[in-house]
Image (cartoon, rainbow, N blue to C red):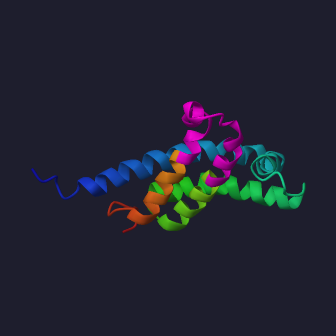
Amino acid sequence: MKPPAYSKDLGLLILRVGIGVMFMFHGLPKLLGGPERWEVLAQFGLPFLPEGIISIAFGFAAMAAELVGGLLLALGKYHRIACLGLAATMAVAFSTKVGDISGISNFAQAAGWPLELLIVFVALLFTGPGKYTVGK
């Protein structure tokens, strides 16, 4: 039996909106935390950055990728740009977790979440948003 023609696009819509809204929930507290939180965020993910405005800018970029990227992903607008920003953020998040891996038995628990989402965003980058988007 052949699936209905709309099933791929409906699946992409559900995935985009679900993941996009969840990332908005991740980004909102970072937005509300202000520059101090952005600097801490950047220093955690990229400890080689100097303190001050550079770290604040990188932390702001991570927050914006989550909050704005999540919104754009959910809406299906600027889809590939949103996926690139979110994938980059998850790559940095994964890099912070690699040191916690003590073997194959705890890989998923220690570092799986950001790697799994990195894979999702790369896959979405290639699939596109589907036909159900805002403003099409």
Give left or right: position of 4 versus 101: left
Q: Nearer the viewer, residue 73 or 99?
A: 99
Which residue does the image show at 24% across and 53% down from the upper left? 7
Which residue does the image show at 87% across and 60% down from the upper left? 53
Q: Nearer the viewer, residue 127 or 81?
A: 127
Q: Nearer the viewer, residue 64 or 43?
A: 43
Q: How many marks?
A: 0
Q: Is residue 128 visible?
A: no
Q: Is residue 123 visible?
A: yes
Locate the C terminus and report the quarter of the image it occupies. bottom left
Above-or-below relation of 94 to 121: above
* Secondary structure mainly formed by the magenta segment: helix
- Residue 99 in magenta? yes
| Start-end of magenta stretch | 91-115
- Residue 22 in magenta? no
Which residue does the image show at 44% across and 58% down from the upper left? 123
Give left or right: position of 66 versus 131: right
Q: Nearer the viewer, residue 124 or 69?
A: 124
Residue 65 on image: x %, y %: 62, 57
Give left or right: position of 47 versus 93: right
